[in-house]
Amino acid sequence: MYQQITLVGNLGNDPELRHAPNGDPVTNLRVATSRSWTGADGQRQEKTVWFDVSVWRRLAETCNQYLSKGERVLVIGELDEPAVWTDANGNARADLKVQARTVRFLGSRGQGNVVSEGQATYANGQHAPSPSSNGGEGIPF
């Protein structure tokens, strides 16, 4: 069996890079997805759902380097089992965690760039140069 989730949303804070005990880099992203509609009463309504996204290895380093709070991203990954808890007001809450396999930068700095685990590719499918092939300057994809 297989499951996949696709999110399009904005980063709620700057990426946080840390390293796992085995030395692998991992970046945490907080992604907000929102939808709005007009209710039966004619009032505009909005709902925002937050996701905690974990990005690993080279993809983690790239996201940490080029993303910042407020930027729009598309994330493709796997949804972990939600952690359900009760807040201070007695409301049921759930933490939605996603392990990312692909991140597409939709903001102005990385407009339309796709970064997948393993290597970077442009949205049109062409392979991007590695950081060493462009002298290590600028965006490596």
Image (cartoon, rainbow, N blue to C red):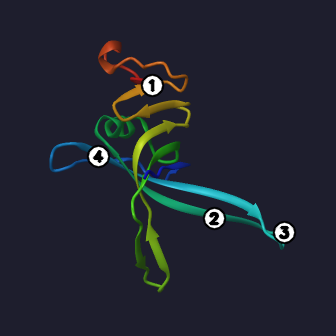
Quote the CA–CA distance across marks 1 and 4: 20 Å
Badge 4 amino acid: Val
Quote the CA–CA distance across marks 3 and 1: 44 Å
Pointer 2: residues within 10 angstroms few (<14), some, or many (20+)?
few
Q: Residue at x 17, y 43 (%)?
A: 23
| Label 2 with label 4: CB-CB less than 8 Å | no
Q: Which label sits in the foreground, 1 or 4?
A: 1
Residue at the left extreme of this rendering: 22
| Label 2 with label 3: CB-CB less than 8 Å | no
Sequence-first disc among 2 and 4: 4
Pointer 4: residues within 10 angstroms few (<14), some, or many (20+)?
many
Relative horizontal placement of residue 84, taking residue 9 as reference (left or right) = left
Q: Judging from the image, what secondary structure is the residue with disc 3 in?
A: loop
Badge 1 amino acid: Thr
Quote the CA–CA distance across marks 4 and 3: 44 Å
Could you tell me if residue 110 is visible in this image? Answer: no
Q: Residue at x 50, y 82 (%)?
A: 91
Q: Which residue is mark 2?
A: 47
Q: Which residue is mark 4?
A: 26
Tell me: residue 21, above or below residue 119.
Answer: below
Which label was assigned to residue 71? none
Q: Position of residue 121 (x, y in %)?
A: 45, 25
Which label was assigned to residue 121? 1
Tell me: residue 93, above or below residue 99.
Answer: below
Badge 3 amino acid: Gly
Quote the CA–CA distance across marks 2 and 3: 16 Å
Could you tell me if residue 32 is visible in this image? Answer: yes
Q: Quadrant of residue 35?
A: bottom right
